[in-house]
Amino acid sequence: MARSKSSERWLREHFGDAFVRQAQALGLRSRAAFKLLEIDQRDRLLRPGQTVVDLGAAPGGWAQVAADKVGPGGRVVALDLLPIEPLPGVTVLQGDFTEQAVLDRLLGELDGRPVDLVLSDMAPNMSGMKAVDQPRSALLAELALDCARQVLRPKGDLLLKMFQGEGFDPLLAELRAAFSKVVVRKPKASRPRSREVYLLARNYRLV
């Protein structure tokens, strides 16, 4: 079957991508690991001993970085609809995060342990139609915020992916109401033409 022009462009970009090559050389699960590494270097999110929840974790690039940073005294719980190959120091859950039963499994795994940081690199399967993709992206971001409200300790942090467009400003307002500080990050490993940005919300105000 002939490849479409868009898939050919993706293949050229992907395999010619310096971040892809570097991830392979360093044994990282994905180029996305560099997004978290850059944000962490700038904002000092990850520290030894933390409990971290990673939503939309497959194939495991962020969880891999988080487990390395929190060390043996910390804990990382990673969740995705897709299977994730086992990672040292990471508890892996598989399921559709839009379903309440899957959130309940995550809460059961935490067993009341307060979470220091919630990460969400969740994104919908892109259709290429903005009118469809943007609301789906906004829903996943809202679900990540809802999860953070249930599991974060006071002064905990949330880092989530969101696409600029409809729903962005209301989400930003919600984050600012729940956290002391909210900033927007666009790491170098995020492709320039992508509308994705990362919202970093710090110091959760438990209400």
Image (spheres, rainbow, N blue to C red):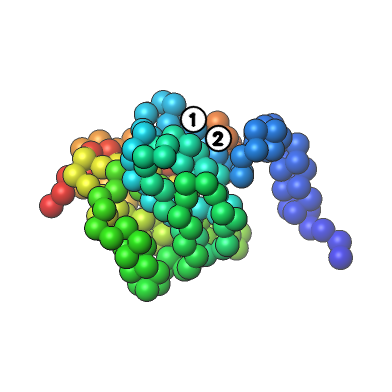
* The N terminus - image quarter: bottom right
Q: Which mark is residue 10?
A: none
Q: Residues within 10 Å of mark 2 (few under 14, many from 20)?
A: many
Q: Is residue 168 left or right of residue 7?
A: left
Q: Residues within 10 Å of mark 1 (few under 14, many from 20)?
A: some
Residue 194 position, x and y percent, is 56, 44
- Residue 63 in the image: above or below residue 81: above
- Seen as rendered, the residue at the extreme left is 207
Badge 1 vs badge 2, beta-carbon distance below 8 Å: yes
Residue 64 position, x and y percent, is 52, 43
Q: Is residue 187 left or right of residue 158?
A: right
Residue 19 position, x and y percent, is 65, 34
- Residue 142 in the image: above or below residue 66: below
Q: For marks 1 and 2, give the CA distance.
A: 6 Å
The residue that mark 1 highlights is 38
Residue ID at (33%, 69%): 104
The residue that mark 2 highlights is 34
Across the whole image, how many numbered discs are drawn on residues? Answer: 2
Residue 51 position, x and y percent, is 34, 45
- Seen as rendered, the residue at the extreme right is 1
Residue ID at (32%, 65%): 108
